[in-house]
Amino acid sequence: MLRLELRNISKQYPSVKANDRVNLRVKPGEIHAVLGENGAGKSTLMKIIYGAVRPDEGEVLWNGELVTIRNPHEARRLGISMVFQHFSLFDTLTAAENVWLGLDKGPSLADVSQRIVQVAQEYGLDVDPLRPVHTLSVGERQRVEIVRALMTKPQLLILDEPTSVLTPQAVDKLFVTLRQLASEGCSILYISHKLDEIRALCHHCTVLGAGRVRGEVDPTLESNASLSRLMIGAEPPQLQHVKARAGDVVLAVRDLSLAKQDHFGMNLHRIGFEVRAGEIVGIAGVSGNGQQGLMAALSGEDPRAAAESIRLYDRPIGRLSPAVRRRRGLHFVPEERLGRGAVPGLSLAQNTLLTRTESVSRAGWIANGRVDVLTRKLIARFKVKAGGPDAPAKSLSGGNLQKFIVGREIDAKPRVLIVSQPTWGVDVGAAAQIRAELLKLRDESCAVLVVSEELDELFEICDRLVVISQGRVSPSVNVGDASVEMIGQWMSGLWDTQEKELAHEGA
């Protein structure tokens, strides 16, 4: 008997048909991948299964019986849990309170907190139940979502881009967890754009394109190239990464120390590094080691830094506002798409105006026609699937919104670009495009600083790397002199020994 069967599921939105007569069959204990480019209809289909979206037509069978799943509460009662790509957590509540809200009446908050600790330890996921969600990084929030789903002991677990901001070590632990769950009979629907993960983890793969099923394959018998061809109709383009021609220092961070702003934050200790014109410097690190505080200090969201500790073109900017820094050529892409990178309820045109103010006169008048033209240009240049400039940001898939936000800043031709998690949740084709655009920006003498928890990405596009751990940063190392294993060790704060070894080898 099948755990889940979808028959001819369709869903129409005003500007797009997200699902078009989709059929899907999942067996008990099966890890089933759903693969497709951004906007293929994957997330909509998962939300239909979870009861967050109602299909226009089609049938859902659960353990062989026809069911109507009207809301997530009914889904959870059936034994279906979901970890969303865009997190569904209340910022002002603690991790434990968020989990408690999603459980049936019965256990006390103290019992839930204790159970969170047990589940987190059992599956190797570091979660503090007492931390308010607003103090957590994206990676830490993802761990809360995963623990919350595991606590319901689901028969079907839906994971939408679960490893997009997890470190390689955390991914390995998660895979052990998922294989253990599958061996216990839990079915898993796994959405990811990481083809290596799908081939290593999943038993079966359904490929979606333009809302329809393009094919079904055994991913263990496929290559990355063949899966890419099924998904986007071609293999992703190879990046042309020529050696950087680094120029003068553009952004300099020197002896930056900041006390954490809340009890759960991370103090920054004597942070120091430089970014030159015409190079990409990457910052690697396990989520929650000071990246948020550092990005807030660099962008100007946290203006407490000593003025001299951050210099742009050798001028102190540590106390300047984000707007002034932007006017001086420093642009910033935050890790959180919805809420910080874009306002969900505003249109793409209105979101363009958040950082691209060239269409606003000194008197404050907005040239709507120019805004519309610019937004259409961004949509076309970065291949964003959207219903036009008037489409609300929240109507886009996660990957398409990411392309729009990153593209908005790249197109502004910044002198310095700081970007956090540039390819979070985007498909292989879009990830290749974003990385190529960052390299092109570098070759046009922009200084680029990339914060990412994907080591493969950092090694692919960066010229130099630094590692952040416990609020401290390592010395920089040329990518050619580093390895994934070495950077993985540095992410635990163990860089003194390897640094000395590198110096000895270079002598």
Image: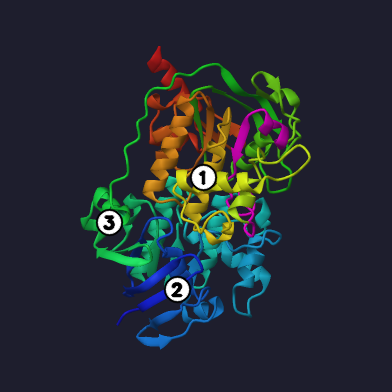
Mark earlier in primary sequence (1, 2): 2
Q: Say which residue appears at 26% left-offset and 64% top-offset.
A: 215
Q: Which element carries disc 3, helix, strand or loop? A: helix
Q: Quadrant of residue 447?
A: top right
* Residue 155: mark: none
- As displayed, is residue 474 above or below residue 79? above
Of labels 1 and 2, the one closer to you: 1
Mark earlier in primary sequence (1, 3): 3
For label 3, the residue is 230
Q: Say which residue appears at 41% left-offset and 61% top-offset.
A: 177
Q: Which element carries disc 1, helix, strand or loop? A: helix
Q: Quadrant of the C terminus?
A: top left
Mark earlier in primary sequence (2, 3): 2
Distance CA(mark 1)–CA(mark 3): 27 Å
For label 1, the residue is 378
Identity of the amino acid at label 2? Answer: Lys
Graded by Cα atoms within 10 Å as few (under 14), some (14 to 19) or many (20 or more), the crowding at tag 2 reads: many
In magenta segment, residue 82: no
Identity of the amino acid at label 3? Answer: Leu
Q: Quadrant of the N terminus?
A: bottom left
The secondary structure that most of the magenta stretch takes on is: loop
| Residue range of the region highlighted in magenta in the rendering | 322-346
> Can residue 97 be seen here?
yes
Identity of the amino acid at label 1? Answer: Leu
| Residue that protrudes farthest toward the front in the picture | 369
Residue 153 coordinates in the image, percent (x, y): 47, 73
- As displayed, is residue 404 above or below residue 345? above
- As displayed, is residue 206 above or below residue 430? below
Residue 287 coordinates in the image, percent (x, y): 55, 45
Residue 267 coordinates in the image, percent (x, y): 68, 38
Q: Nearer the viewer, residue 107 or 294?
A: 294
Residue 263 coordinates in the image, percent (x, y): 72, 48
